[in-house]
Image (tube, rainbow, N blue to C red):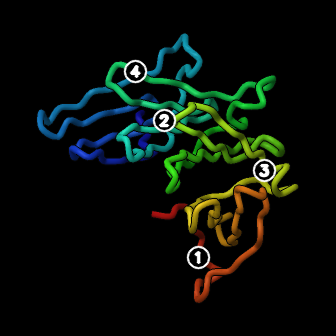
Amino acid sequence: PVIFNDITIDSADNIWLGTNQGLIFFDHKKETFEMFKPDPDGDLGHSDMYCLKFDTFNNLWIGTHFNGLLKYDDKSVLNSFSSYNDNKTSLTPGWAYRIYESSDGKVWIATIGGVGQTGINEFDPKTESIRPHPFESIFPGFQGFTAFVEQRPGEFLVSTGNAFYIYYTRSNVVQNTTLQGFPDSVYVFNFS
């Protein structure tokens, strides 16, 4: 069965669905569906398309289950970014499960794996370079977070479910914080 993981709408009101069997596109004007399946012999194999995010240039960023990140900027082109053990400028290991564009146009990708295999990655679209921030180096013992959003340039509010932190990207420091009037019993899994 097809499992729907995420949905987003582009600037032309077309609908994009991330599924366990590929990417589904609904053309608003034509009222037709199109399915984009990963190449089974390629690096991404049969990866789940787990999370979807458009940036300000109308590129679609796709977080996949276990095998990295896809950038979709043309109907015929999917660029992939993956984790490589011997490359310190590749994505941190795990599956890409949150994508966010900061005010400076950089794309931030959260990955989650096991202990020591989780992180946040800073992608610069101008240079197409990735700067990984492994959680183990930022916050020892920290397994990952459920959501993040930019508060100010270089400063992210991070949720681990029911706990909140401020992550300062320039200094790689994490500081515990509270949200005034926010109940401890509510878990946050996404910021809009």
The disc placed on residue 186 is: 1
Spatial separation of the CA atoms under disc 4 and disc 1:
40 Å
Earlier-in-chain disc, 2 versus 4: 2
Q: Quadrant of residue 96?
A: top right
Q: CA distance from mark 2 to mark 3?
A: 23 Å
Q: Position of residue 158 (x, y in %)?
A: 65, 64
Amino acid type, residue under disc 2 in the picture = Met
- Per the image, the residue denoted by label 3 is 135
Q: Residues within 10 Å of mark 1 (few under 14, many from 20)?
A: few
**Image quadrant containing the N terminus:** top left
User: Looking at the image, do the residues carrying marks 1 and 2 touch, with CB atoms under 8 Å apart?
Assistant: no
Q: Quadrant of residue 22?
A: top left
Q: On residue 49, which mark appears? A: 2
Q: Amino acid at mark 1?
A: Val
Distance between the alpha carbons at the discs numbered 4 and 3: 31 Å
Asked whether, in this view, residue 56 is left or right of residue 137, the answer is left
Q: Report, in whole angstroms, how far the alpha carbon at label 2 lies from the one at label 4.
A: 16 Å
Sequence-first tag of 2 and 3: 2
| Apparent side of residue 190 relative to residue 18 in the rendered image (left or right) | right
Asked whether the residues under the numbered discs 2 and 4 touch, taking CB atoms below 8 Å apart as contact, a structural biologist would say no
In the image shown, does 41 or 2 lie closer to the viewer?
41
Q: Which label's residue is closer to the chain start, 4 or 1?
A: 4
Q: Quadrant of the C terminus?
A: bottom left
Q: Amino acid at mark 3?
A: Phe
Q: Residue furthest left?
A: 30
Q: Tell me the amino acid under the disc marked 4.
A: Val
- First in sequence: mark 4 vs mark 3: 4
| Residue lying at the far top of the rendered structure | 41
Residue at 34 percent across and 26 percent down: it is: 74
Q: Residue at x 57, y 68 (%)?
A: 151
Q: Is residue 56 left or right of residue 49?
A: left
